[in-house]
Every structure is written in C-alpha cells, then in structure tokens.
Amino acid sequence: MKFILAGIFVLRCNFYSNFAQGATTTRQTTFKDHSAHVSTSTNSIHTSTTTPGPIAYELHRDKIIPDLSTLDKCPQRVLKVIYEEDGYGAVCYGNTLKAATAHAAPETVAWKCENPDEATFYTIIFVDLDAPSRSNPVDREWLHWIVGNIPDNRLHSGQTIAEYIGPTPMHGNGTHRFVFQLFLQEKGKIHFEDTYLTARANDPRRAKFSSKEFAKKYSLGRPHAVNYFLVTWPEEQGLEEGETPVQPPVIPMTTEEYTEIDLLNW
C-alpha cells in the first residue's frame, strides 16, 4: 500500500509538470484520468485556453482564489518547494504537512528563470491565510517569510526582509492554508524600504499583512508562480470532516529520485 500511495504522489507531481509546459486540458479530462496525460508527450495533448488547468482547480478548490489578495487568476508556472530532502517534506498544491516538518525554511525552493541570458530578480512571500482560524481570519494574511532581490533562482543570495517562521500550533483552530508566492521583479533590483522583521513568532507586525499592497508598492504585479500546503490543528486528531487532501509520499525518496519527478521537469 505504501508504494501505491507514493506512486499516486509521483503521478500527481508529473501531471503538474505537464501543465507547466502548456499541457492544459479540460477540467473533466484532467481530473478523471491523470495517468493518461502523465505518459503522453506534451506535443500530442490538445490544449485549451478556456478551461481551468489542474493548478487552477486546486487553487479554487481550497479557495486560495479568491482568499489570497494577489490572485485574481491562476499563475501558469510551477514553484517547487521541498522542506526535507528525504521526500517527506515536498509541497504539492494542497497536500497536508506536519507543522514540525515546516518549522525551518525549506531546503529547496526552485523555479525556472524566464531570461537565463539576462540578470533577473525575484521575490518570495510566504503567508498563512487562516490566522487565527479559517472561520475567523481576522489576522489574514499572517506573514511568515519574505526574501527579495533573489538573483535568478539563487534564493540564498537574496535579501531577507522578514525572517522565516514556521507554522505555530494553535490547537482547535482547524486547517490553515500556507501559501508560497513567487514574484518576478520586472523592473530589476528593488530598494526595499520595509522594516526588517526577525524570527520572533508572535510579532504583531506580521498580522494583517497584504501581499497585494506589498506587490503594488514595489510594482511586482501578479504572482509568477505559487504553491501551498495545509496544516490541521490539532494534528493528532487527523483531518476535519469532509477534508480529503492528498498525502505526501510515505516512503523516503532521495534527491536524485525526486529530481526524476521534478515538478518543473527541467
């Protein structure tokens, strides 16, 4: 059974890879027959510009759209996020992770650069949409991380504006949606004027952050790519009624093995 679950996760990741390369299909076909498109060349898939692709489906299903202020339509690119390189910490559009898995910044955050022959800069923003709870999100968005002026895809060379803090257990508050946004700095390097935030978890300045206002202030436009995961409180009680998030693989995967199912398929 554990190999079957891992196989399902692999197929799902490969399917997003196909979509990122332009393999967009109808909603009915996309979600009733994943495997038919995983093994098919993108050149042989009939594309559609009028129906939502798989990423759009996930973002609407979990109401990332419209709850995230920057998203009025789905980005067409994939953002790869891995917390732990053993394969248990891969973020995959609405899968459930343990809070402990995400306590430190991801080991891998990767995307495909738009202009490999020119210097390009990006900004990463990571927020919680459900603070203190999804039913009463009065502190939406709770800011967890900002790194700007990232050259190409070298995250560690970027400028940290808000230090990373992981999900903090808030028992009894149900499921929280944690969203990564990648912005392309179309005007090049930016002079960020915002106050530097340390990793103090309960800093009230992190509450009621607006990705939309931040993006507007620095002319970042819409998110270039997104990804997200769920955390359910209290974790030991399992999922809430009616929830069916896709689980991460239950067998370890090496970095090399994960590369073979790379969400970006570079």
Image (cartoon, helix red, strand yellow):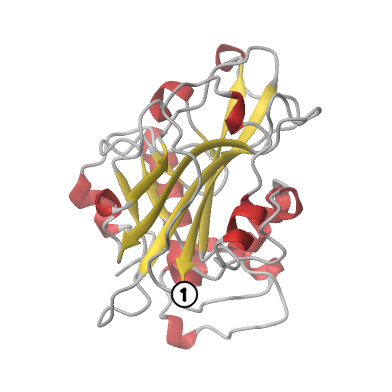
Front in this rendered view, residue 25 or 63: 63
State which quadrant residue 232 falls in.
top right
47 is higher (above) or lower (below) than 155: below
Q: Is residue 39 above or below residue 176?
A: below
Percent position of residue 71, x then y: 67, 60
The quarter of the rendered structure image containing the N terminus is: top left
Q: Position of residue 117 (x, y in %)?
A: 25, 83
Left or right position of 202 against 26:
left
Q: Which residue sits at x=45%, y=54%?
A: 192
Name which residue lies at 61% across and 13% down. Answer: 237
Q: Which residue is at 74% across, 48% downward?
A: 67
Q: In terms of image quadrants, where is residue 261?
A: bottom left
Residue situated in front as seen by the camera: 254 or 29: 254
Spot the residue most to the right.
135
Residue 121 in the figure: left or right of residue 167 = left
Residue occupied by mark 1: 186
The residue nearer to you, when weighing 78 against 43, is 78
**Label 1 environment density (alpha carbons within 10 Å; few <14, some 14–19, many ≥20):** few
Secondary structure beneath dot 1 equals loop
Residue under the point 65% across and 62% down:
56
- Quarter of the image with the C terminus in it: bottom left
Where is residue 16? Give x, y as percent: 48, 62
| Total count of labels | 1
